[in-house]
Amino acid sequence: GLSTPENLFPVTLLIPLPGVKLGLANIVTVFALYQLGPLPALCILAARCLLGSLFAGNASALLFSLLGGTLAMLVMLALSRLPGLSVYGVSIGGAAGHNIGQMAAALITLGNTAVLGYLPFLLVVSLFTGALTGFVSALLLRAIENLLHNTVGHNAVPVHVTIRADAADGMLTIQVTDDGQGYPPAVLAVLQAGETGENPPHVLGLHVVEQILAAHGGTAAFAQALPHGAAAALTLPL
């Protein structure tokens, strides 16, 4: 999961406060909330918390994950229903909710209200970590929106689309596949040649996806899915 590569970033060297992290794992929650809906996002959150506690090997990790993640989800769900509020605002609210939830877990675990002194500082940090999470989430949502529009616009019949996320070696990869007619060979040839001239809309939409990823140090690769359909792999550094 994203919490593993997150540990490679020593944020506490810059902000010497206990419990301060980038919150990269919340990218999955934000993405799932916007793309899949509240219930699937909640299920993914629960699975992530359970798996994280198993790897950590202690029950207190589960308490911190569940309280932080659940409150973050509830806050983001409420904020996402507000008209005009962008994914950045929703993500910042989720980061603040996560810190408040983990502070509640600390109160339960330690039985000492002294830890509440950290809360104002953690809420300030939430502005930056939440904005970072919102930035990456908005990037992924925009790129995938372009892929989905491309799929719908270039298939005469309804198709099934599968979206899968994986994190390994400090890279986040989003795989989007469908069971439609796939990319025409001429389109793949243009993309592999890196041409950006006078291209049909099918190619231009995919070039936009490439440009979004490239602008932020990522890559987009397109291929034919088996036995038929289109496949796209979006990769971003964590």
Image (cartoon, rainbow, N blue to C red):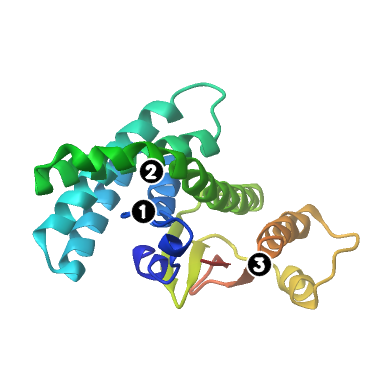
- Residue 29 in the image, given as x and y percentages of width and height: 38, 48
Mark 1 or 3: in front is: 1
In this view, 15 is above or below 111: below
In this view, 211 is above or below 38: below
Separation (CA) of disc 1 from disc 3: 29 Å
Please state which amino acid type lies under the numbered disc 1.
Answer: Leu
Q: Which residue is mark 1?
A: 17
Separation (CA) of disc 2 from disc 3: 29 Å
Tell me if 151 is positioned left or right of 162 in this view. Answer: right
**Residue at 45% from the left image edge and 58% from the top image edge:** 163
How crowded pointer 3 is (Cα within 10 Å; few <14, some 14-19, many 20+) is rated as few
How crowded pointer 2 is (Cα within 10 Å; few <14, some 14-19, many 20+) is rated as many
- Residue 53 in the image, given as x and y percentages of width and height: 18, 62
* Of 128 and 69, the residue lying toward us: 128
SS category of the residue bearing label 2: helix
**Residue at 47% from the left image edge and 44% from the top image edge:** 130
- Who comes first in sequence, dot 2 or dot 1? 1
Residues at circles 2 and 1 in contact by the CB criterion of under 8 Å: yes
Q: Which residue is mark 2?
A: 122
**Residue at 42% from the left image edge and 35% from the top image edge:** 93
- Residue 57 in the image, given as x and y percentages of width and height: 13, 69
Task: Please tell me in which quadrant of the rendered image residue 62 appears.
Answer: bottom left
Tell me if 146 is positioned left or right of 85 in this view. Answer: right
